[in-house]
Image: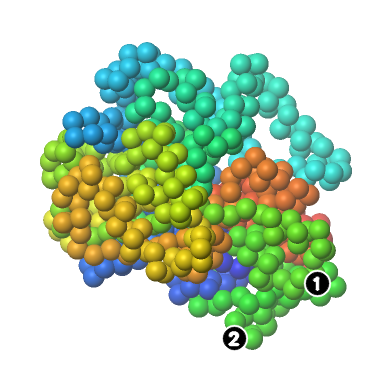
Amino acid sequence: MLDALIIGGGHNGLTCACYLAAAGLKVRVLERRSVLGGAAVTEEFHPGFRNSALAYTVSLLNPTVIRDLRLAEHGLRILERPLANFLPLSDTSYLKVGGSLAATQAEVAKFSERDALQLPRYYAMLERVADVLRSIVLETPPNVGGGVSEMLRALATGNRVRKLTMPERRDLLDLVAKSAGDLLDTWFESAPIKAALGFDAVVGHYASPYTPGSGYVLLHHCFGEVNGKRGAWGHAVGGMGAITQAMAAEARRREVELHTDAPVARVIVRDRRAAGVVLGDGTEIAAHCVIANVNPKLLYRDLIEPSALDAEFLQRVAGYRCGSGTVRINVALSALPDFTCLPGREAAPHHRSGIICAPSLAYMERAFFDARDGGLARAPIVEVLIPSTVDDSLAPLGQHVASLFCQQFAPELPDGRSWDAEKDEAVRRAFAVVDGFAPNFSAAVIGYKASTPLDLERDYGLIGGDIFHGALTPDQLYSARPFLGYADYRAPIRGLYLCGSGTHPGGGVTGAPGHNAAREIINDWRRRRIPH
């Protein structure tokens, strides 16, 4: 019999498998699709053009996971962006963020000398608060009402907060509870820098930047690093699939069994304990424990018989909020975008940055209101990345691939409309936004592949198209992720665990949930809480 079965071969499932195998467990990973990697895969989407299929940029991947899984030894290389972001604002105006603090200040000073002087203080504040988050990323949150051991965990977290000064505690509260817009309005006066910083608050978040709690989403995107440089973002050479292929290589080295085309239909529960799974073809596989690297809602709603869970818990599952408002487009290009405000079709630093086509927080708010009212933003928020400017393996010589991460689009369209019918219109609107800043963009399109919220759910199991496996809001974070009483990666069924982004610390390509879940499973294994 297997010691552990992992449902889902995404990056967290592979991470969990590697740690379990290192502890001596016999582990099998079951992936529904024909390729390992989940949402972090590289695929050919147009003849001769390859790109990251969904997840598309690197920062949050935890350095402990990179080291422990020997990802660099398996070929993973991450290249830092020369600029963090480029915001085209009009035909004559733009903002560059990154390169150095002095360079960013000079850019911001074009719009506000005051904001340029504020910037170092803002960055220092954000870094101090991000340090608190970094300190708990690889820890198991305390379970509310869980006894003495959980009280000690809560005390340890509280001690970290107590070490902060009172102004730092206020900053922490602001970032967790306030809206990003309200926070940024207290720091800055010019729209461009607020847009550049506030974009992180709406990435994967179906909400306005003025929605309370969006400050945390901003913070969540700031605790990462690239090659030891905190707060940086980068490109994985070969696309995001290079990360999961390196993980898979290490899993094989540790003798993990990796199975693709193996959809799980149901978790077997006997005597309130997980005993294995049933595959889509009816095959039963027994195991001492089952670990789900899927959205909690998918696990509890679709893979477990309702009779195995109590009614109150099922009600909580029904209320677990998912939905990112995302349309993801990969584009094959014959030429680089030629921005009216910064002309040129040769690769320049701004082409190698995150290009944010959303010039103000008000623009971002209108996009959300449009989606909420009509399903599709009239002028969506579009971030463009062109990884072929740093990785020429992705496209034919002289041509390029672009990743378009587009928001806001309703996870479920009103009036019974179907995303299959609305996909072309969503793409048209996204392309029109980019054309507004780089008029040659649409004319340079050779081909594309678009994924709507419905596609993301059907193809990747992302309920509501939610890239984070559940909204990153205060009621679904830390000890409440996914539910109070079950934040320690254990399910209400013995022998059943969760290791995906629906657990602490949440979404993004981090590897942290897989790392943390493995630790708890190994502890239970050694204490014989899992029979073997």
Residue at x 29% of width, y 57% of height: 428
Tags 1 and 2 in contact by the CB under 8 Å rule? no
Q: Do we see residue 424 in this rendering?
A: yes
Which residue corresponds to mark 1? Answer: 307
Residue type beneath disc 1: Ser
Q: Residue furthest bottom?
A: 282
Residue at x 58% of width, y 55% of height: 322
Tell me which label, 1 or 2, sits earlier in the chain: 2
Which residue corresponds to mark 2? Answer: 281
Q: Residue furthest front?
A: 415
Q: In which quadrant is the C terminus drawn?
A: bottom right
Q: In which quadrant is the N terminus drawn?
A: bottom right
Above or below for 171 versus 232: above
Q: 316 or 124: nearer the eye?
A: 316
Closest to the camera, between mark 1 and mark 2, is 1
- In the rendering, which numbered label is found on residue 500? none
Q: Quadrant of residue 494?
A: bottom right
Q: Do we see residue 138 in this rendering?
A: no
Secondary structure under badge 2? Answer: loop
